[in-house]
């Protein structure tokens, strides 16, 4: 890469995606003061079809596919993703160059009248497009009415304010990155709602044959946070899951020890298996696979077959 050429950051066009790209742009501008950092907006498949439920849109990676094509075509140098959207298997020639320091991993409840989950009236309409969220919410509150919701964060909040829903559940980090933390009624505790693997982390993807960009991005990564998300994704992979199944996982670290919490449920929340394990920070994949085997022994695969 020539020193005079800009570094092109690829991002989806939603307000949240652009805000996340700005975070990366600012970090790179501070580190590479002699380089111009540009943002290139690329519309993703899921953004083009914002009405159909996510479960009806075929294929994994619906939020990242076009960015990866742009990377392969050399139209951009770096793709900025929410790590939870990144498929388990990357296209040939592309590399997960860095996992940035993780931000708030929990889900947030935003409700009309500022009612917390426990205080929502019986039969309240809750908007979510995630089977993971739906199953855990119904496990906690069988009386709630789950309704699909699509669109970016801004449109979801607007639909809530218009009265189409009594509450919505979204990733808390998205609201925080958009400066909308004051909209959060309640951070849902991990005992109630485990997040999607990788939630709260930003991923930077680059070409394997672009060593200069890889070298520039590598120091941006947080090794301990990367180990956490690798454990979560290994758990997901071992269960044969993707982004549209009710599987959740969250790993944290204490010194050199990883602690992993995982969950598998039926979509209607009537059955749920959950477990925890811990192991060395330098062996995250084995830890994820170990917890998956434990939950499989408790019937996790049987639950997944019912989806």
Image (cartoon, rainbow, N blue to C red):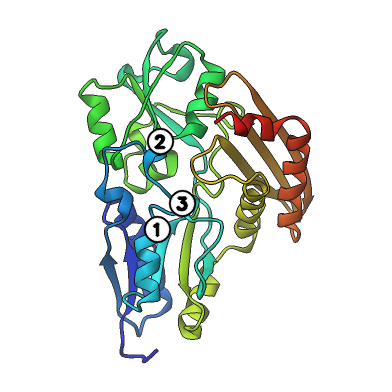
Quadrant for the N terminus in the image: bottom left
Q: Which residue is mark 3?
A: 60
| Element marked by disc 3 | loop
In the picture as drawn, the residue positioned furthest to the top comes out as: 122
Left or right: 173 as drawn, with respect to 276: left
Q: CA distance from mark 2 to mark 1?
A: 19 Å
Tell me what residue is drawn at x 46 percent, y 66 percent. 204
Q: Is residue 29 above or below residue 256?
A: below
Q: Which residue is mark 1?
A: 64
Where is residue 123 drawn, in percent x and y? 39, 10
**First-in-chain label (2 vs 1):** 1
Tell me what residue is drawn at x 76 percent, y 59 percent. 283
Q: Quadrant of residue 89?
A: bottom right
Quadrant for the C terminus in the image: top right
Looking at the rendered image, the disc whose residue lies closer to the viewer, 1 or 3, is: 3
Tell me what residue is drawn at x 54 percent, y 74 percent. 218
Q: CA distance from mark 1 to mark 3?
A: 9 Å
């Amino acid at each position: 890469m020539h020193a005079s050429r800009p570094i092109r950051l690829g991002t989806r066009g939603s307000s949240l995606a652009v805000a996340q790209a700005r975070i990366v742009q600012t970090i790179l501008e501070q580190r590479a003061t002699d380089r111009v950092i540009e943002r290139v907006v690329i519309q993703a498949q899921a953004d083009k079809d914002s009405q159909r439920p996510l479960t009806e849109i075929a294929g994994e990676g619906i939020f990242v596919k076009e960015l990866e094509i742009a990377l392969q075509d050399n139209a951009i140098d770096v793709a900025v993703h929410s790590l939870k959207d990144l498929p388990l298997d990357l296209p040939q020639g592309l590399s997960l160059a860095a996992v940035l320091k993780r931000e708030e991993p929990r889900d947030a409840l935003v409700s009309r009248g500022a009612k917390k989950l426990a205080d929502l009236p019986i039969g309240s309409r809750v908007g979510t497009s995630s089977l993971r969220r739906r199953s855990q919410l119904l496990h906690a509150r069988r009386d709630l009415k789950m309704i699909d919701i699509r669109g970016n964060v801004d449109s979801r909040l607007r639909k809530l304010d218009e009265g189409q829903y009594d509450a919505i559940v979204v990733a808390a980090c998205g609201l925080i990155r958009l400066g909308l933390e004051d909209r959060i009624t309640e951070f849902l505790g991990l005992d109630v709602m485990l997040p999607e693997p990788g939630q709260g982390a930003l991923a930077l993807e680059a070409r394997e044959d672009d060593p200069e960009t890889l070298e520039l991005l590598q120091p941006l990564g947080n090794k301990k946070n990367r180990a956490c998300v690798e454990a979560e994704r290994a758990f997901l992979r071992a269960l044969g899951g993707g982004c549209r199944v009710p599987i959740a996982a969250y790993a944290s670290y204490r010194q050199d020890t990883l602690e992993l919490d995982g969950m598998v449920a039926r979509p209607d929340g009537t059955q749920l298996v959950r477990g925890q394990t811990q192991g060395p920070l330098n062996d995250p994949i084995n830890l994820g696979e170990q917890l998956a085997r434990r939950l499989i022994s408790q019937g996790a695969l049987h639950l997944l077959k019912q989806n």
